[in-house]
Image (spheres, rainbow, N blue to C red):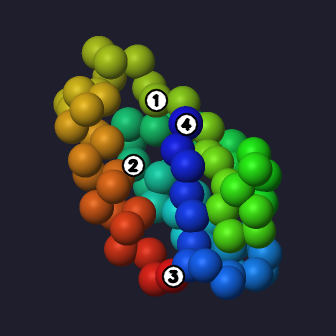
Amino acid sequence: MLRLQTAVGSDLTETDRAFRKAETILLARPEIDRVFAIVGGFGSGVNGGVVFVTLVPPEQRQLTQQQFQGLLRRDLNAIPG
């Protein structure tokens, strides 16, 4: 599970746009089987949400979960806003 947040003051449309970019980044990774995103939920207000990520089995990945987390932080933090 990933918690994502856009800039304070972002409206739901801006947050949705950022989440769609995040989904594109996530789904391009071979380590990920599927994602499910919820924008504006889980008490985060309109400028946040969560993404549930299902990884492929460990034997089908070249990276550990911890290594992969570092890559995702870098890639997702590069999304403007």
Q: Nearer the viewer, residue 55 or 10?
A: 10
Q: Which residue is mark 2?
A: 29
Left or right of residue 45: residue 66? left
The amino acid on which the numbered mark 4 sits, given as a three-letter code, is: Met
Mark linked to residue 81: 3
Q: Which residue is mark 4?
A: 1
The amino acid on which the numbered mark 2 sits, given as a three-letter code, is: Arg
The amino acid on which the numbered mark 1 sits, given as a three-letter code, is: Leu
Mark nearer the viewer, 4 or 2: 4
Q: Nearer the viewer, residue 63 or 37?
A: 37
Q: Compare marks 1 and 2 and give the one earlier in the sequence.
A: 2
Callout 3: 10 Å neighbours few (<14), some, many (20+)?
Answer: few
The amino acid on which the numbered mark 3 sits, given as a three-letter code, is: Gly
Whole-angstrom CA distance, mark 3 to mark 1, is 26 Å
Q: Nearer the viewer, residue 43 or 22?
A: 43
Q: Which residue is mark 1?
A: 55
Whole-angstrom CA distance, mark 4 to mark 2, is 16 Å
Mark nearer the viewer, 2 or 3: 3
What residue is shown at x 51% (from left), y 82% (from top)? Answer: 81
Whole-angstrom CA distance, mark 3 to mark 4, is 20 Å
What residue is shown at x 61% (from left), y 79% (from top)? Answer: 8
Q: Position of residue 28 (x, y in %)?
A: 44, 55
